[in-house]
């Protein structure tokens, strides 16, 4: 018998032109700080739509949140919130902007050093400003969950946090807002959502057939639409909608409820991003195939199930089927134009010592669903990814 709680209060506004409905969900007297990354939201007209939807509410815009959002930039926004008295935040962008907004929402009212929010994995969060999101880049699922990741550059740390205080109140998901994205970001989104699903699914059997089937449907869908998204001469609304909803469901808590979860690929990938500024999804593509090869014995049953149900691999010995499933995973990432080796990003064996040291420094010494991925195992995984 499984025991779990599933809590997700985020109101999803899905479909074309739903930005216009923001006004129904932001208090009439709110002082709103809009948070964005670069200039694309302004150039595409999305910011103009957001401002129009806010109507007469007092609002301002803070821009400059980076991919892999930094603690340093987020703290500048915290200062703006505190000094100018904003009481509602609105993230307009992808997962990086939304993650930063979650941190800012928690850090603005935080008493003491906000870095403690990250060193405690979010456990020290007792309150947060309300916020909503307008998603423009489907990938991380941050628009419908209570977690985020922030990078602190001065010490080379990328730290996750989680708290029920930082669920978005609402999220606008308009697939048409993805039309101006470069294909590299579409590819990142597909792979990011795929690995998010894998981390919650590919562990060991616990008699959770519904969660397994939910996860497998997401993996099958992403494998089906991924190449089609890249080859389409023009954006297809239905495919963009499928990607957007798949990425949201991959990490809104549903498929992970009541089942063991891994996340070792993410923890190792975070260090590669922090040290070498590689896109998050691409670090996952580097680590996961080697991770699965290293863990083929403890993950045996689920690897066989994954190979059969997701990739249709039904013939051969168990070892042959597992090898084929891992190979299909690597091939899928490469079909999406994403390299799966450290050498694809100009990195060699010289980086491994530093990555392992960072894992040790950040307490990432017992990773995986069995908590038995030690620094020595992480080293083997990285060596296999060369």
Image: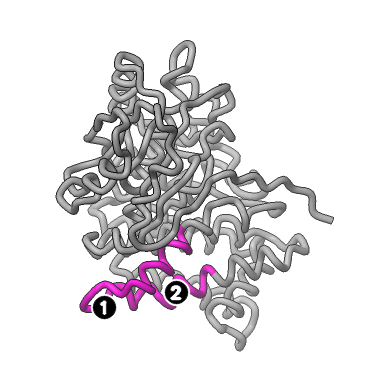
Residue displayed at 60% across by 78% down: 309
* Residue that badge 2 annotates: 223
In the rendered image, residue 230 lying in the magenta stretch gets the answer: yes
Magenta region: which residues?
218-247
Tell me how far mark 2 sits from mark 1, CA to CA.
15 Å
The quadrant in which the N terminus is found is bottom right
Above or below, comparing residue 96 to residue 230 in the picture: above
Using the image as rendered, state which of residue 102 and residue 274 is in the foreground. 102
Q: Position of residue 238 (x, y in %)?
A: 38, 74
Viewer-side residue, 10 vs 328: 10
N-terminal of the pair, mark 2 or mark 1, is: 2
Residue 87 in view: yes
Q: How is the image coloured?
A: one colour
* Coordinates of residue 290 in the picture (x, y in percent): 47, 60
On screen, residue 231 versus residue 16, left or right, reads: left
Q: Is residue 122 left or right of residue 16?
A: right
Residue at 61% in and 88% down:
315
Indicate the secondary structure of the residue bearing disc 1: loop
SS at mark 2? Answer: helix
* Marking on residue 232: 1
Q: Residue at 42% across / 37% down in the picture?
A: 26
Q: Residues within 10 Å of mark 1 (few under 14, many from 20)?
A: few
Q: Relative to residue 202, is residue 168 drawn left or right?
A: left
Q: Position of residue 220 (x, y in %)?
A: 51, 74
The nearer-to-camera label among 2 and 1 is 1
Could you say where residue 27 lies in the image, as x and y percent from the top left? Answer: 44, 33
The quarter holding residue 343 reads bottom left
Instruction: Decide if residue 78 is on the left or right side of residue 313.
Output: left
Query: Callout 2: few (<14), some (14-19), or many (20+) C-alpha neighbours within 10 Å?
Result: many
**Looking at the rendering, in which quadrant would you find the C terminus?**
bottom left
User: Do tag 2 and tag 1 residues touch (Cβ < 8 Å)?
Assistant: no
- Depth order, front residue of 308/37: 37
């Amino acid at each position: 018998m499984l025991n779990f709680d599933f809590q997700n209060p985020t109101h999803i506004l899905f479909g074309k032109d739903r930005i216009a409905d923001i006004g129904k969900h932001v208090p009439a007297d709110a002082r709103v700080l809009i948070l964005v990354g670069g200039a694309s939201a302004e150039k595409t007209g999305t910011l103009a739509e957001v401002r129009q939807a806010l109507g007469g509410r007092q609002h301002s815009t803070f821009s400059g949140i980076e991919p892999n959002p930094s603690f340093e930039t987020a703290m500048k926004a915290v200062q703006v919130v505190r000094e100018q008295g904003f009481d509602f935040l609105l993230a307009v962008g992808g997962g990086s902007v939304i993650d930063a907004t979650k941190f800012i929402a928690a850090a603005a009212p935080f008493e003491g050093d906000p870095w403690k929010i990250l060193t405690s994995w979010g456990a020290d969060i007792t309150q947060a400003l309300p916020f909503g999101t307008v998603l423009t880049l489907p990938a991380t699922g941050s628009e419908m969950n209570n977690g985020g990741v922030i990078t602190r550059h001065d010490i080379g740390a990328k730290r996750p946090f989680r708290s029920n205080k930082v669920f978005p109140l609402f999220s606008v998901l308009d697939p048409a807002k993805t039309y101006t994205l470069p294909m590299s970001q579409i590819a990142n989104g597909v792979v990011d959502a795929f690995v998010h699903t894998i981390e919650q699914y590919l562990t060991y059997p616990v008699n959770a057939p519904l969660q397994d089937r939910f996860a497998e449907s997401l993996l099958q869908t992403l494998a089906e639409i991924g190449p089609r998204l890249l080859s389409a001469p023009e954006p297809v609304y239905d495919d963009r909608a499928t990607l957007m909803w798949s990425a949201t469901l991959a990490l809104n808590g549903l498929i992970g409820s009541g089942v063991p979860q891994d996340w070792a690929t993410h923890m190792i990938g975070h260090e590669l991003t922090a040290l070498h500024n590689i896109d998050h999804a691409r670090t996952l593509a580097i680590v996961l195939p080697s991770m699965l090869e290293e863990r083929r014995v403890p993950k045996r049953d689920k690897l066989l199930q994954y190979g059969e149900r997701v990739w249709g691999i039904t013939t051969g010995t168990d070892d042959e089927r597992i090898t084929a499933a891992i190979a299909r995973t690597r091939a899928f990432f490469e079909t999406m134009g994403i390299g799966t080796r450290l050498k694809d990003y100009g990195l060699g064996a010289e980086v491994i010592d530093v990555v392992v040291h960072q894992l040790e420094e950040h307490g990432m010494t017992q990773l995986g669903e069995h908590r038995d991925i030690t620094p020595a195992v992480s080293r083997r995984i990285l060596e296999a990814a060369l």
